[in-house]
Amino acid sequence: MVSASGGLNQQRVAICNAIALASFLNATLVLPRFLYSIVWKDPSQFGDIYQEEYFMNIMKDEVNIVKELPSHLKSLDIEAIGSLITDADIVKEATPIDYLTKTLPLLLQNGVVHFLGFGNRLGSDPLPSKLQKLRCKCNFHALKFVPKIQEAGSLLIRRIRKYDAAQATLDRQLFGEFLTGSPSNKHDSARGSSKYLALHLRFEVDMIAYSLCDFGGGEKERRELQTYRESHFPMLMERLKHFMPISSSVLRNLGRCPLTPEEAALMLAGLGVKRGTYIYLASSHIYGGKFRMHSFTNLYPNLVTKETLLTPSEVSPFRNFSSQLAALDFIACATADVFAMTDSGSQLSSLVSGFRTYYGGGHAPTLRPNKKRLAAILSENGTIGWNSFEDRVRKMIKDGQSVRIRGFGRSIYRQPRCPECMCKTY
Ligand SMILES: *[C@@H]1O[C@H](CO)[C@@H](O)[C@H](O)[C@H]1NC(C)=O
Ligand SMILES: *[C@@H]1O[C@H](CO)[C@@H](O)[C@H](O)[C@H]1NC(C)=O
Ligand SMILES: *[C@@H]1O[C@H](CO)[C@@H](O)[C@H](O)[C@H]1NC(C)=O
């Protein structure tokens, strides 16, 4: 059994890691459950987000999956018999050997083990290629969103593209039967479909407070972030007492500061993204809200979100379910003509870019700024001319875009180009 912690995307990784692990241990997998988190506040379970039967059916030849624990095991107190395994019991990126020595004996003795959390608990290399294949199959083929999410996702995309566009394999994968190929009305069809760029701009209070960087908001911002750190990151504050403070400009030059909305806008402008471009802004509560987004929207007024594209009554079935809302963002980002991220460490950006590599047929570009290089370029703000700014931003993005074969230790979800996942790797 697995009870996965985290939001939608962490859970997705946990599910596919659980598939690989169950196969490795020759164990039956109980349909994964999702832990309720006070951060995400979403009671959704597997079947509220993914198609259960479809999942079980696609994986059935490799892993036996059941919906419930059989009755003779149900009555056990799993914790009391020592079969509850938390993230503290297993190292991050654990290897199969770790599971053979620690988990298998428990499984054989008690007939059941329950992983609680299971975040990031199965590493990438070395891993038998059969298990990598299973992860790949699980992530890219077995997890289909439920019709309710597919339908809203499809509606969202139709509204942005102003056209019932059946783009490609990527859309079929995401929308299932809610894919229609005809323009929604004559007017739209005459105008043609509009392309859009999806942006995952991570500028949330927790990550910017944690970064210890300065974001140009003056004394008010400094005080606010300091207060936030004191109440949310006591361990960080404790650690800081023992070190010399590092200045914000040093941190920025090291590439440690999340991009601000202003920096993201500059990057897009440097790449030649036109003012009229529709930009879908994924999730995230931007620190400073509308006010902080002001210069961005000045430059790019056609900024849309799921909340602006869908009517309140269309959003309301999802309102209290952050994972289901995140699924809509996942769809809008995965299917965008261009996807831009500001933080390559984010699970959403990482899974979306993997999806675009896998299903995009080489036509689904992902823009990955290198924060360190961008900081170096922006630090010349007093002297750099626009043309040279453009050249350098373009070069930075181009270097980050080069199609790569999965490197050692890299996640197959993010970099599916490898023999175990995409048969043709180029
Ligand atoms: C699982 O089954 C296979 C095939 O029967 C066997 O080779 C392997 O050793 C088993 N693994 C475990 C962990 O029991
Ligand atoms: C969402 O939750 C709030 C507060 O918990 C509740 O008042 C509201 O009715 C819920 N909305 C939906 C659509 O379930
Ligand atoms: C311009 O660069 C200088 C030096 O790095 C920095 O102090 C200043 O904040 C930058 N200004 C803007 C608007 O980014």
Image: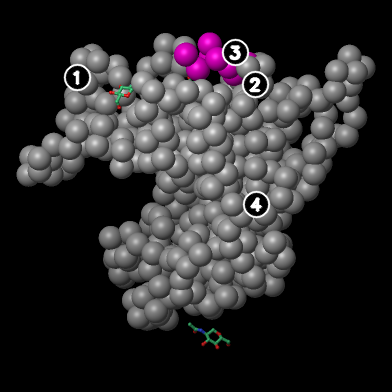
Residues marked 2 and 4 touching at CB (< 8 Å): no
Residue 425 vertical position relative to residue 7 in the rendered view, above or below: below
Q: Which of marks 2 and 4 is nearer the N terminus?
A: 2
Whichever of callouts 1 and 4 sits on the residue coming sooner in the sequence is 1
Residue pointed to by mark 1: 223
Say few, some or many: other residues with alpha carbon within 10 Å of mark 3 (under 14 / 14 to 19 / 20 or more): some
Residue 357 is tagged as 4
Describe residue 346's horizontal placement relative to residue 297 as left or right. left
The residue that appears at 85% across and 23% down in the rendered structure is 192
Q: Is residue 283 visible?
A: no
Up/down of 29 relative to 256, above or below: below
What residue did someone put label 3 on?
Answer: 301
Q: What residue type is labelled 4?
A: Thr
Residue 121: x %, y % from top left = 40, 62
Instruction: Work out whether mark 3 precedes mark 4 in sequence or the reverse, and give the earlier one.
Output: 3
Which residue is label 2 attached to?
A: 274
Q: Nearer the viewer, residue 312 or 183?
A: 183
Crowding at mark 4 (Cα within 10 Å: few <14, some 14-19, many 20+): many
Mark 1 residue element:
helix
Identify the magenta region: 295-303
> Are discs 2 and 1 less than 8 Å apart at CB?
no
